[in-house]
Amino acid sequence: PAHRRRGSSRGRARPWWPGWGRAPLLVIPVWDGPRLSGVYFRNLGDPVLTRCPRYVSPKDALPDAPFNGAALESGARTLLVIEGYLNAYVAAAEPYRAAAIGIPGAWTWRDAWALRIPDATRFVVGVFDADDAGRKGAARVRDSIARARGPQWARARWRTLLLGADICELHQARELAPVLGEEPWTGQDVDPLWADVEDDLMKEPG
């Protein structure tokens, strides 16, 4: 019948699916404690060759919390803000059990998340790649925390850990435990971390 021909697979709208027929995708549910915050798809192939971004999500399922968002409010001595969901998962899993949240990129960080970090957290450590993009990403999260909590609060807590290899690679090489165990951020000189901050950002409100 004519109505069936019009409803054929050729006539139906293609369902939303990133990298349709081009990229192998990993479905990542983003939990904020017991609440499902949203869903991301991670492209396991080359973004250039597959013509699909590394991370992508449908507009109506964008997460409104970082991966493992409950760690924000854990009150742990050190909170790791890690670029990459899989990297954060590895750091939070056995045997490391770090209080770690994951973001797909510094551009996804929100000022409101800084307000969820309790004062009991002594260090907030941005874990990024040791390149220009990683340094800019760490600075972006740092500035957001300073805006939300005040420069003094952020300066006392913010540290960076810039890695030449990502956490998954270090784990596979059995080199991650020494990095996390040594906690190099505890003795880190904070002055270089704030050298590029605008003067008005560093001024206390009022």
Image (cartoon, grey):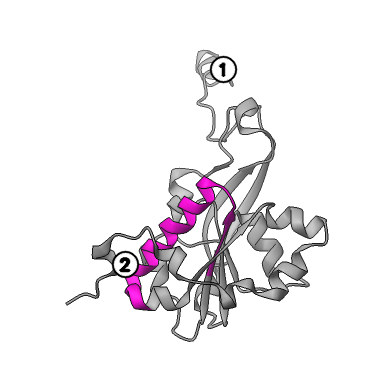
Left or right relative to 19: residue 141: left
Residue 107 position, x and y percent, is 43, 50
Quadrant in which residue 146 is drawn: bottom left
How far is mark 1 from mark 2, CA to CA? 52 Å
Residue 137 position, x and y percent, is 48, 53
Q: Main secondary structure of the magenta part?
A: helix
In this rendering, the answer to whether 190 lies above or below 25 is below
Q: Quadrant of the C terminus?
A: bottom left
Which residue is identified by label 2? 147
Q: Quadrant of the N terminus?
A: top right
Residue 121 position, x and y percent, is 50, 82
Which residue is identified by label 1? 10
> Circle 1: is it few (<14), some (14-19), or many (20+) Cα within 10 Å?
few
Report the amino acid beneath label 1. Arg
- Please provide the residue range marked out in magenta: 125-152
What SS does tag 1 mark?
loop
Quadrant in which residue 168 is drawn: bottom right
Residue at image point 78% right, 72% down: 95
Residue at image point 60% right, 31% down: 19
